[in-house]
Amino acid sequence: MVAAPTAMDTGRWFEDFAVGERFTSAGRPVTADDLAAFTRLSGDDHPLHAGPGAMLQGPFGIAVAMGLMQSLGLHGEAVQGLLDTHWHYRAPIRVGDVLHLELMILRARRTRSGTRGTVTRHMRLVGDDGATRQEGTTTALVAARTSGPDDDGRAFGTVGWGRAVVDALDPETAAVLETWDGTIGLRCDDDEVHLRVYRGAVIDVSRRAPHGATFTLVADAATWLELVEAPDNPLLRLAMTGRVSATGDGYEYLRLTRALHLIVDAARAIA
């Protein structure tokens, strides 16, 4: 866990963000003045927001989350804009709650120009009782100091990451795939890389194979992080709970369970 920086911190540039980093803000009390001010600002004076037990308007939570993120000192002059927000309301926020923000860096991808990149954060607004009030992801456009190169170790689903995974494969992988001919896809959100396999050897790593993937292993960025950070390889457990899934030929996917386990082991090694 990383402590909040001092007031002199001017924030980070794109290269300074590492996928998997976690931060926690200080607490922020919710007051009756907050409720009154946000009601005036938003014009949302629904009865839910008045009287004993009143709950704050939903957008109040994301506004507080953004403010708490700013208090961490991560986003200074290098930030060029907010690109998207995907948000979920889990429980009411009420006067008297003390909220803090738990933030994790999910993704960092440089743009084609090389002069900036996108940084995706998972943000969780938590009460002093430990329960999640609201959570979601936001992506910011952040200027870069240099044009790279960047570390591929946690650039899940990219060609660079795929090549690094192949380089780290255990020799057992060749024996497991000795009689198999096909393409394994590995997807993380919008990024997908294809590993073309012929007689036990990965002969090509690309964004798309000529005939597509035989099957594709699919997980979001948070799940890929858990796959590479857990003490033991959790692939089977996450597959059984539905957090890891597959598209394409389901029979081949199940038949290559051991090979996939070895591929995830390689991803864990380079992470």
Image (cartoon, rainbow, N blue to C red):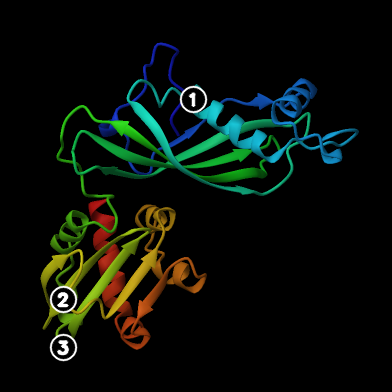
- Work out how far the residue at label 2 is from the one at label 3, CA to CA, in angstroms: 21 Å
Horizontally, is 239 left or right of 271 in the view?
A: right
Residue 178 horizontal/vertical position (percent): 14, 84
Q: CA distance from mark 1 to mark 2?
A: 45 Å
66, 166: nearer the viewer: 66
Between 88 and 177, the one nearer to me in the picture: 88
Residue corresponding to mark 3:
179
Q: Is residue 49 above or below residue 206?
A: above
Q: Quadrant of residue 59?
A: top right
> In the picture shown, does residue 7 fall above or below 245?
above
Q: Please tell me whether mark 3 sits on a helix, a strand or a loop.
A: loop
Does 97 sit above or below residue 48?
Answer: above
Instruction: Examine the image and state in which quarter residue 232 appears.
Output: bottom left
Three-letter amino acid code of the residue under disc 2:
Pro
| Residue, disc 1 | 70
Q: Position of residue 79 (x, y in %)?
A: 36, 28
Are dots 3 and 1 in contact, CB under 8 Å? no
Residue type, label 3? Thr
Please report the residue visible at 33 percent of the width from the left and 78 percent of the height from the top: 257
Callout 1–callout 2 Cβ contact below 8 Å = no
Q: Earlier in the sequence, mark 2 or mark 3?
A: 3
**Residue marked by disc 2:** 210
Q: Residues within 10 Å of mark 3 (few under 14, many from 20)?
A: few
Question: Which structural element holds mark 2?
Answer: loop
Which of labels 1 and 2 is toward the front?
2
Quarter of the image with the N terminus is: top left
Q: Position of residue 72 (x, y in %)?
A: 47, 25
